[in-house]
Image: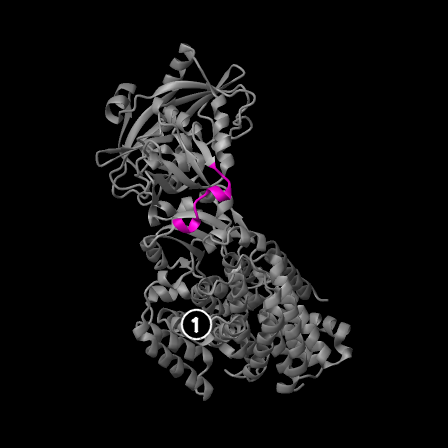
C-alpha cells in the first residue's frame, strides 16, 4: 500500500464516519472531502472542481427542473384521478395501480417528487375506502423506487454509473438500457407486495380502532382522545371577561382550545380574541398534567419586601422605550426570533402599536415598523439599546412615566418557593413565569444574597425568594388558571370528535414538502399559529405522537403534523411550497393548461437522446430551459425543485472517485474484494457487489456511494477479465434498492409520519424485497449484459 493509497482510504474512512454519525450535513461532508483531496495533492485543483461541470451533475439538476415542470402542470394529478376510476375499492387492484402509476412517473421524474405528488391522492383514497394509510403509502414509495430502475433518467445512481462508463472511455448506458432488468424487477416487486408484503404492512391498533370506531380517522391515528378533555372555571373566576389570548390557557397550560360549549351550542375553533363567559366549558387538547403542574404554584407564598432591597433594585433596574424605524432588520421577526433577551440582557415588557398596548403572548408577536418597545433591565444594559442600529427614539422612563404612558401600575412582588413546590429544581426558563404570565423575575434572594437579572438557565431552589415586577392582574390570571378544573377525561364523556368538524372547520394532515427550507425550525420560530391561523394538535414522529411543548419541537422531514382550523386556511396553506397538505382539496392550483406542453417538451427532449444525436446532459438542460420558457414553471420554482444538497453531494464526492482511480485505491479495494469471492464465479461477484452496495446505502447517501463503488466495480471487472457493464448495472440497481430503512431514501422518510410507520416496519417489508431484487439481479443481469 502506497502513501497516496493510504491517504485516500483515510479520507474515505473519515467521510464514512461523518456520514454515519450525521454530525454534519451530507453536502458539507462532500465539500470537506473535495477540499481535503485538493489540499493533500491527491487531485489537481481542476480535478477537485470537475464535479460541478460533470455531465452527471448537470443531468441530475436539469432532471430536477423537468420533474418540477411535470409536477406544476398537474401531470400526476391527472394520473391520480384515474387511479380511483381504475382501481375502485379493491385493495389488491389498488396496490397494483398505485405501484404502476408511481413507477411510470418515476421513470421520467424525481422519485421523491413523485411520492410527494401522489401522497395527497393516496391519502384521500384511504379516507374514502376507510383503509389505514399504512396499507397503501409504503407500496406507493416502493413503486416510485422500483420505477426509477427502469430508465437512465429514473434515478441519480443510473446517471452516475453511465457517466462513470463514459469517463473510462466506454459507451455509456442508453436511455432504455435499464428497462429490461428494471421492468422485470418492478414486476417481481409488485407481485411480492400483492402476495406477501401487504400482509406484513402494519394496520392501526385493533383495540384503538374499536374504542374509537365512531371517531374521526385522523383523531384516531394521532390518539387525540387520549389528550382531549373538558375544562371549566368558577363563575367568579378572573378569567371571565378575558379573551382566550389574555387568559394564557395556551402559553401557560399549553392547551389548544378546539371548541367552546356555551348555552347548548358548540363554537368550533374559537379565535384568540374570543371573550370567555360565565358557564363556558372548553374542549381542550393537550396534557392534563400541565394543569396539575400549575396547581403546584399555589404553594408560592407572598412575602413582604425589605425597603432597602426595594431601593437597591430601583437603583439597578430601569425601564426604557425605543422605536423600530422602517429600516430596522428586526421588522418581520417575532420577538422570540429576534432574541433581544440574549443580545441585550433585557426583557421586553410591552409593545405599543398604533395606539394599542400589547402585553400578552409577546414572544409570538411579529414586530412591525414604528412599534415602540418597552424594555426593562439593568440600567447599564439599557444604554446598549440606545447605541443599537435596530432602534431610534430611545428614552429612559421613570415609574411615573411608566404608569402614565403604558398604564402599567406595576409593583415589586416577592414570592417564595416552598420546599414542596413544583418550581423547585426547574430552571427559570422552565418555570415559564415570564413567557406564560409576563412576570419578570428581576432577582433572586438566596441565603441572604441577592442575584439580579438571573439568566434563563438559573436553577430555582426551595426557599428562593423571587423578586418579580408585574401587574396585580397578572397574579389574578395565575390564580384564575389555578382554579381551572378538569370536568371529564373519560372517553365516553367526551363529545364525538367528528362533532368538532363542520363545513367551515376541519382536521387535516400535513408534512414538510421535499423542497422545504424549514427543516429544523420550530412552530414558534415559524410563528405558525399567527401566520397561518391554524392550530397544531399533534406531531407524529417515528411511530408515536408527540404531545409535549409542540411549539418548540424542531420539525423534521417525515413528521406527520395534525392541523385544526378553518378549511379556507387549510387551502391557503396548501399553496405554500414548504408544506404538503395531505388532501387534494387543499392543493395549490396547478397549470393544467400547460400539461400538453410539458409532455411535448419531454418527448422533444428524449427523442434526440434515443436517436443518439445529443448527450443526455445537453438534452436535459434544453428540456429544463424549455420548461421555464413555456411557463410550465417559473425560474424561482425551478431553483426550489433542484435538490441542492444532492447536487453538492455528487459534485463534492466525484473527485474522491478520481483520487481512488488515480492513486490505485480502487484497484487495491477491488483486489481485496476479488481475494474473498473472485474465485467463486462471476455471478457470486455480482451477488457480493449487490450485498456490499445495498448494505452501504444504510449509512452512506446513495449518490455518494455510487461514486465510490463505480471505480471498485470497474477495477474488479478488469482484474477478472469481465465486461464492466453487468457489474456497473448491479451497482446501480443495488444503490436504488433502498427499501429496508426509512433513512436510506427521502421518499421513505416522507411517508413515515402519515403512515404511522416504525423502523421495524421497513425492515419487515424491505428486507425480503431486497433479497428478491438480489436474486433477480444475479439471475438476469448477465442475461441482458453478458460477462
Q: Is residue 212 magenta?
A: no
Segment tinted magenta in the rendering:
488-499
Asked whether residue 496 is drawn in magenta, I would say yes
Q: Position of residue 539 (x, y in %)?
A: 48, 50
Number of numbered discs present?
1
Q: Nearer the viewer, residue 715 or 368?
A: 368
Task: Report whether 149 appears left or right of 597.
Answer: right
Instruction: State the quadrant of the C terminus.
Output: bottom right
Return the residue at label 1: 84
Give the residue at the far left of this rendering.
355
Q: Position of residue 272 (x, y in %)?
A: 33, 40
In the image, residue 435 sits, relative to residue 77, either above or below, namely: above
Colouring rule applied to residues: one colour
Residue 107 position in % (x across, y down): 49, 76
State the quadrant of the N terminus.
Answer: bottom right
For mark 1, does the 10 Å Cα neighbourhood hold few (<14), some (14 to 19), or many (20 or more) residues? some
Q: Quadrant of residue 739?
A: bottom right
Q: Is residue 630 visible?
A: no
Residue furthest to the bottom: 611
Of residues 584 and 163, the one drawn nearer to the viewer in this rendering: 584
- The residue sitting at 52% across, 26% down in the picture is 460
Q: Which residue sits at x=43%, y=56%? A: 510
Give the residue at x 51% y 83%: 176
Amino acid at each position: 500500500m502506497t502513501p497516496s493509497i493510504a491517504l485516500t482510504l483515510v479520507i474515505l474512512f473519515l467521510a464514512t464516519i461523518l456520514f454515519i454519525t450525521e454530525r454534519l450535513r451530507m453536502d458539507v461532508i462532500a465539500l470537506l472531502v473535495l477540499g481535503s483531496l485538493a489540499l493533500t495533492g491527491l487531485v489537481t485543483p481542476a480535478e477537485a472542481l470537475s464535479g460541478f461541470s460533470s455531465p452527471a451533475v448537470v443531468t441530475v439538476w436539469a432532471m430536477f427542473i423537468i420533474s418540477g415542470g411535470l409536477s406544476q402542470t398537474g401531470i400526476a394529478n391527472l394520473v391520480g384521478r384515474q387511479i380511483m376510476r381504475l382501481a375502485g375499492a379493491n385493495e389488491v387492484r389498488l396496490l397494483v395501480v398505485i405501484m404502476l402509476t408511481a413507477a411510470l412517473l418515476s421513470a421520467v421524474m424525481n422519485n421523491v417528487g413523485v411520492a410527494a405528488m401522489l401522497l395527497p391522492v393516496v391519502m384521500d383514497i384511504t379516507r374514502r375506502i376507510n383503509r389505514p394509510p399504512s396499507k397503501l403509502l409504503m407500496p406507493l414509495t416502493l413503486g416510485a423506487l422500483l420505477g426509477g430502475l427502469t430508465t437512465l433518467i429514473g434515478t441519480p445512481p443510473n446517471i452516475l454509473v453511465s457517466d462513470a462508463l463514459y469517463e473510462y472511455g466506454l459507451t455509456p448506458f442508453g436511455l432504455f438500457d435499464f428497462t429490461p432488468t428494471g421492468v422485470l424487477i418492478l414486476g417481481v416487486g409488485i407481485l411480492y407486495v400483492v402476495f406477501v408484503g401487504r400482509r406484513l404492512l402494519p394496520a392501526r391498533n385493533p383495540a384503538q380502532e374499536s374504542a374509537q370506531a365512531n371517531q374521526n380517522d385522523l383523531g384516531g391515528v394521532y390518539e387525540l382522545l387520549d389528550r382531549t378533555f373538558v375544562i371549566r372555571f368558577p363563575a367568579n373566576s378572573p378569567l371571565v371577561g378575558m379573551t382566550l389570548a389574555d387568559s394564557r390557557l395556551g402559553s401557560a397550560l399549553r392547551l389548544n382550545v378546539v371548541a367552546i360549549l356555551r348555552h347548548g351550542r358548540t363554537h368550533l375553533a374559537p379565535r384568540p380574541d374570543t371573550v370567555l363567559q360565565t358557564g363556558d366549558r372548553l374542549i381542550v387538547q393537550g396534557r392534563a398534567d400541565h394543569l396539575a403542574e400549575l396547581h403546584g404554584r399555589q404553594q408560592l407564598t407572598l412575602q413582604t419586601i425589605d425597603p432597602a432591597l426595594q431601593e437597591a433594585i430601583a437603583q439597578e433596574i430601569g425601564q426604557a422605550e425605543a422605536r423600530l424605524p422602517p429600516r430596522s432588520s428586526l421588522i418581520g421577526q417575532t420577538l422570540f426570533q429576534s432574541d433581544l433577551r440574549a443580545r441585550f440582557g433585557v426583557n421586553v415588557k410591552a409593545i405599543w402599536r398604533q395606539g394599542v398596548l400589547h402585553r400578552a403572548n409577546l414572544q409570538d408577536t411579529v414586530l412591525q415598523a414604528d412599534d415602540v418597545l418597552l424594555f426593562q433591565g439593568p440600567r447599564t444594559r439599557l444604554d446598549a439599546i440606545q447605541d443599537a442600529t435596530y432602534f431610534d427614539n430611545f428614552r429612559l422612563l421613570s415609574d411615573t412615566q411608566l404608569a402614565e404612558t403604558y398604564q402599567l401600575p406595576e409593583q415589586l412582588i416577592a414570592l417564595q418557593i416552598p420546599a414542596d413546590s413544583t418550581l423547585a429544581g426547574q430552571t427559570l426558563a422552565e418555570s415559564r413565569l415570564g413567557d406564560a404570565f409576563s412576570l419578570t423575575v428581576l432577582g433572586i434572594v438566596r441565603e441572604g444574597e441577592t442575584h439580579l437579572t438571573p439568566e434563563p438557565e438559573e436553577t430555582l431552589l426551595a426557599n428562593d425568594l423571587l423578586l418579580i415586577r408585574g401587574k396585580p392582574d397578572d397574579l389574578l390570571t395565575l390564580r384564575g388558571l389555578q382554579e381551572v378544573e378538569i370536568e371529564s377525561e373519560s372517553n365516553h364523556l367526551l363529545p364525538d370528535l367528528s362533532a368538532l368538524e363542520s363545513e367551515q372547520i376541519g382536521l387535516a394532515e400535513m408534512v414538510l414538502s421535499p423542497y422545504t427550507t424549514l427543516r429544523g425550525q420550530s412552530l414558534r420560530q415559524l410563528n405558525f399559529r399567527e401566520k397561518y391561523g391554524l392550530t397544531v394538535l399533534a406531531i407524529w414522529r417515528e411511530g408515536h405522537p408527540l404531545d409535549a411543548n409542540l411549539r418548540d419541537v424542531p420539525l423534521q422531514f417525515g413528521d406527520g403534523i395534525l392541523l385544526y382550523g378553518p378549511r379556507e386556511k387549510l387551502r391557503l396553506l396548501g399553496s405554500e411550497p414548504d408544506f404538503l397538505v395531505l388532501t387534494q382539496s387543499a392543493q395549490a392550483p396547478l397549470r393544467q393548461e400547460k400539461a400538453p406542453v410539458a409532455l411535448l417538451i419531454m418527448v422533444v427532449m428524449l427523442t434526440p437522446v434515443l436517436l443518439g444525436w445529443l448527450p443526455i446532459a445537453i438534452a436535459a438542460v434544453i428540456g429544463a430551459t424549455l420548461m421555464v420558457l413555456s411557463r410550465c414553471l417559473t425560474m424561482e420554482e425551478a431553483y426550489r425543485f433542484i435538490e441542492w444538497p444532492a447536487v453538492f453531494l455528487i459534485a463534492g464526492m466525484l473527485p474522491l472517485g478520481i483520487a481512488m482511480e488515480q492513486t490505485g485505491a480502487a484497484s487495491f479495494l477491488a483486489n481485496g474484494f476479488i481475494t474473498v469471492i473472485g474465485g467463486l464465479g462471476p455471478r457470486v461477484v455480482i451477488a457480493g457487489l449487490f450485498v456490499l452496495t445495498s448494505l452501504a446505502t444504510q449509512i452512506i447517501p446513495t449518490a455518494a456511494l455510487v461514486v465510490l463503488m463505480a471505480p471498485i466495480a470497474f477495477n474488479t471487472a478488469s482484474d477478472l477479465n469481465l465486461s464492466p457493464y453487468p457489474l456497473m448495472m448491479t451497482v446501480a440497481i443495488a444503490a436504488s434498492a433502498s427499501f429496508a430503512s426509512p433513512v436510506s431514501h427521502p421518499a421513505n422518510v416522507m411517508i413515515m409520519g402519515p403512515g404511522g410507520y416504525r423502523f421495524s416496519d421497513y425492515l419487515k417489508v424491505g428486507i425480503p424485497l431486497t433479497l428478491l431484487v438480489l436474486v433477480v439481479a444475479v439471475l438476469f443481469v448477465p442475461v441482458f449484459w453478458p460477462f
